[in-house]
Amino acid sequence: MLNRLQKILPFKLPSRSHAAETGEVFLSQRRVYIVPSGAGFAFAGVLILLFVAAINYNLSLGFALTFLLASCAIITMHLTFRNLAYLYLSTGKKSPVFAGQTALFELHLINRRTHPRYAIWLKFITADLPHIEQAIDIAASTSANVVLGSNTYVRGWLAAPKIRLQTRFPLGLLRAWSYWQPDAQVLVYPQPEALDTAPALPVSAQQNGEGDMQSGHDDFAGVRAYQAGDSLKHLAWRQMAKLNTDENSTSFSTLLSKQFDGGGASTLLIDYSTLPYAMDVESKLSRMTRWVLEAEMRGLPYAFKLGDIFYAPAVGAPHQRACLQALALFDEA
């Protein structure tokens, strides 16, 4: 029905069926739609009443006022359309988030014309998002950035919802709008398990003949969580000081021990297959996410195993990103 109507009408009907658009997008005049607003219809009604009154009473000034206001409305229509048309749109940086957090999409609006743009409102038009719009002004021959947020519920890639841009500048008599489906997506990590329910890190250690935990003393290899029986001489005071958030406190809530190569050094392995069979997949991934974050916070090197993916023991931002991405994109099938 819409396709048949489009062939008959001399103008293009508004459509939300645009596929994701890559690269820089240009808002041509065929992509910008304009209609009178509620105030615009009221203004048109006033013009009709003025015109009828001028005819009935043969008022020259009435005709002059009516045609003056009508010409202002025509100029306003041009300004409203020009305020939105011929913009260039592109996407900016996108940072991963955890499920339950708000995914932020940075958008660039580029104005290559010699006139400024005022009061352009942007919003996602997905049904499950709150109706929150952000306004932006763009000076002549410059660009402006705006950040829109989208709710996250599940892990994996989250595509940017469709965006509506609209303006009522300058008098609010008309509304011009356009749609844009950016080719942007944010990686959503699994939601970490709560700290009060997550078990301790899966640290294992070899024992000596007397049954006590022992660590080698050849080369310093890092730090690990303090275990009963560790020597007080091996406490990692510098690392514990960094974890202490209360500058006035003289005690440490988190104890760390130095780890050396050459003895029965502790091994931290975050392995999906060692988790209880009764746990569902998402709960397992949530627990592994919590362990990865905790190991990074303590500065403990950790190995990671998830299905066919295995990462050797390491610590640092690249290792953490690789592990969290594997968790986010894990497919048990």
Image: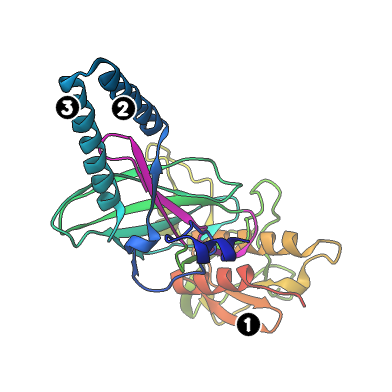
Q: Gap in Å between the C-alphas at discs 3 and 2? A: 11 Å
**Res. 158 visible in picture:** yes
Secondary element at image label 3: helix
Tell me: residue 301, above or below residue 49.
below
Q: Would you name the residue on which mark 2 appears?
A: 47
Name the residue type under label 2.
Leu
| Magenta part of the chain | 153-180
278 lies left or right of 74: right
Seen from this angle, which residue lies furthest right?
A: 278
Name the residue type under label 1.
Phe
**Res. 232 visible in picture:** no
Name the residue type under label 3.
Ala
Mark 3 vs mark 2: which is more N-terminal? 2
Measuring 40% from the left and 32% from the top, which residue is drawn there? 41
Q: Would you name the residue on which mark 3 appears?
A: 64
Q: Would you name the residue on which mark 1 appears?
A: 310
